[in-house]
Amino acid sequence: MQNPPQYGVLTGASDLLAETAEEQGGALWNLAVRQRQLDANLIRLPAGAEVTAHTEPDLDVLLVVFEGGGRLTTVAGEQPLTPGAVAWLARGTERSLAAGSEGLAYFTVHRRRPGMSIGRPSGDRVEEGGEAACLLQQVCPECGRLAAERTARFCTRCGTALPVD
């Protein structure tokens, strides 16, 4: 397998979606370059699948709908998601997503979570460790449901094993 490029065109979203079965949900692609300031993911929710209500406490997220449709629910109410829709999900805001009858494929982009660090109360930090946990390990690859607990190992909707960290 060839190493992915470090910049420029990294993948073709249309090709990835065409090569993947429509009923396969979860993360189909993520930005895997080690030295980066952003995280990005291509997510597919199969028809009727949902990402249950949750709050991202630390990061703003930009969501761009690529294919299919559905709805976004926030404190502002329900909003339709159609191809080309761009949604800004402010940190601290509860949100949920639901795929329509054609499923929903979308990109998420946000600042990269800082690496784990060991520090003193004075703020002197020694940078060690890896990235903080990401929600992708909580998304069921079969039905797209977001697990309620970070420690969940199986989807409560369909019983599929969740990805391992």
Image: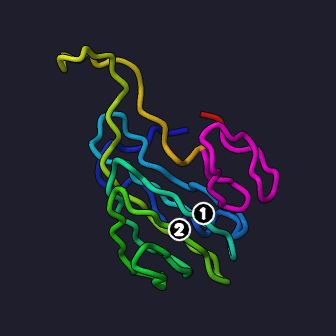
Residue located 41% across and 26% down the image: 130
Q: Which residue is denoted by mark 1 in the rendering?
A: 52
Compared to residue 152, the image places residue 76 above or below, namely below
Residue toward you, 65 or 97:
97
Residue located 42% across and 60% down the image: 108
Compared to residue 49, the image places residue 119 above or below, namely above
- List x then y, in percent, for residue 98: 59, 74
> For the residue marked with disc 2, what is the amino acid?
Ser
Q: Are marks 2 and 1 in contact (CB under 8 Å)?
A: yes
In the displayed structure, does residue 57 sit left or right of residue 13? left
> Residue 95 colored magenta?
no
- List x then y, in percent, for residue 2: 49, 39
Compared to residue 152, the image places residue 106 above or below, namely below
Q: Residues within 10 Å of mark 1 (few under 14, many from 20)?
A: some
Q: Which residue is denoted by mark 2 in the rendering?
A: 96
Nearest to N terminus: mark 2 or mark 1: 1
User: Is residue 35 in sight in this rendering?
Assistant: yes
Residue located 44% across and 73% down the image: 74
Q: CA distance from mark 2 to mark 1?
A: 5 Å
Residue located 72% across and 40% down the image: 153
* Segment tinted magenta in the rendering: 138-163
- List x then y, in percent, for residue 71: 53, 80
- Quadrant for the C terminus, please: top right
Residue toward you, 141 or 33:
141
Q: Secondary structure at mark 1?
A: strand
User: Is residue 82 in sight in this rendering?
Assistant: no
In the displayed structure, does residue 156 sit left or right of residue 38? right
Q: Secondary structure at mark 2?
A: strand
Assign the magenta stretch its main secondary structure.
loop
> For the residue marked with disc 1, what is the amino acid?
Thr
- Quadrant for the N terminus, please: top right
